Image (tube, helix red, strand yellow):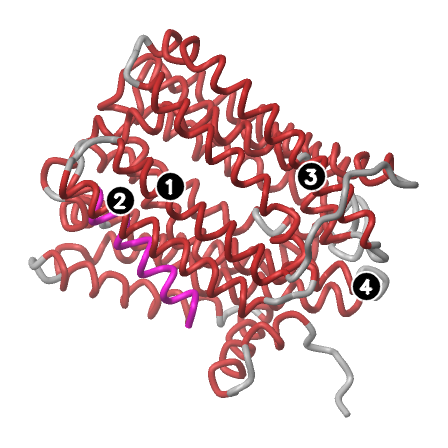
Amino acid sequence: MSQVVMMVTQVASVVTLSRLLSPEDFGLVAMCAPIIALLGMLQDFGLIAATVQKADLRREEVNFLFWVNIGISVSLTLLLIATAPLIALFYNEPRITALIMALAVIIALNGLGAQHAALLHRRMAYRALAVISVLGAVSSLAVAAVWALIAPSYWALFGGSLAGTLVLVGSNIACSRWRPGLPRRIEGWRGLLGFGAGITGFNLSNFFSMNLDKVMIGRAFGGVSLGYYDRAFKLVQLPANAICNPLARVMIPALSRMADEPHRFRSAFERATGLMLLALLPGVACVIVMADVLIPLMFGENWTGAVAIFTALGFAALMQPVNNPSGWVFISQGRSADFFRSGLLSAAGTTLAVLGGLPFGAVGIAVGLSVAEYVKTPLLWMLVGRSGPIHFRDVLRWMGPLVLAAHGAMALVWLARPLLPENAFWGLLSAGLLAYLVFVPLIALSASGRGTLAEAGRLIASRLPARRRLVDPDAPTA
């Protein structure tokens, strides 16, 4: 239920704020987003993952990691404030100087609650985490929307981010019931920071992959083009973020506890990824075809400049749910070095895509990123299969039929477009239903697809929480 609320809130945020604010407002905030994302990853330093993954975590280790997070966060906040004028000079946009300085406050606040959130994940307190996420998202949307109604400008987006961060941090601290002691060095601290360094290496390369496109578009084409690109990117990522991110928070700690049981690990991973792709791929395939209907319906007619960008990015969004679960494997098995290598692979592909697409504008970059995502997919899963219970042939067997079926559903929706209702809402709804109706029989042609459908049927029929069946399908019963 919480994921439904989160999805509705995220969609409402994208739609409502896009209608209240201009593309340039979003473009100015998007100029700041890469540096904020970079510093957010640096302040984490992989220490949250270390808290979740370590088998025998001691209280003094959590306390040590908390103070390391605080020290890094304060240092990065001061650094961001000092360099704000230089970042504005890079974009030739003086308005973002004050905005970057204000956003630095969010960096400091996040450091306060990082270990408290990690402990909730470690305890698998998913109900509390779900409620906290919903409260943060609703608070952020409410403040941003009211601000935009009263004084429409890019500052409304900052106000929403600040409100959401305050709610998240305060709730994590309250719910974790852990309080830090005085800072002190502990035995074995090098091992904790070493694991964190590997995760940080991936995060840095992932940051490069996720933000190089926005930096180059903002620098080369200005705030309006970046605003179109940013909104298209956020919308196309919404379904995957609503499912992949919460599922990752469930699966990583669960798989970490199955690391020494290869059969249970592989079974849980296969079921979770199969159901995730069953939920996501037909919908993404549909919106790729229906982008020229979806964008004006969601954002209004003044956002039609985002249609071609959205269509091109849609193909990358189709493959990202296939590739994202690789991170579950790397982190749960403690393979931070391979996780870092996967990030370097993504960064290399993104660099080539952006440089190749830049002469053709934002649409060219979007096309390049989608091509890079397809090329990366087999290479990434070969890296995953180097060790552990998940092999490349397994991935081909259980994910391959679903990916092929998604492309088949996309083709049939495209062919059926002249027959769909002319009304935007009913046409989009009909296309979505058609995509799922075509997808299901196509995956039923393979044994793995039939297994996924059977698992989906069991989950729908059962009244047990879905995450229990996903995480531990082979656990013994009393």
Residue 214 placement, left or right of 412: right
Residue beneath disc 2: 144
> Per the image, is 16 magenta?
yes
Type of the residue with mark 1 = Ser
At 57% from the left edge and 67% from the top edge, which residue is drawn? 126
Mark positioned earlier in the residue sequence (2 or 3): 3
Confirm or deny contact between disc 3 and disc 4 (CB under 8 A): no
Numbered disc in front, either 3 or 1: 1
Confirm or deny contact between disc 1 and disc 2 (CB under 8 A): yes
Q: Provide the residue span drawn in magenta.
A: 1-17
Q: CA distance from mark 3 to mark 4?
A: 25 Å
Residue beneath disc 3: 46
Q: Position of residue 260 (x, y in %)?
A: 86, 62
Q: Residues within 10 Å of mark 4 (few under 14, many from 20)?
A: some
Looking at the rendered structure, which numbered label has been put on residue 161? 1
Query: Going by the picture, which residue comes out furthest to the front?
Result: 182
Looking at the picture, tell me which residue is in the foreground, 302 or 185.
Answer: 185
In the structure shown, which secondary structural element does the residue marked by tag 4 occupy?
helix
Mark positioned earlier in the residue sequence (3 or 4): 3
Numbered disc in front, either 2 or 3: 2
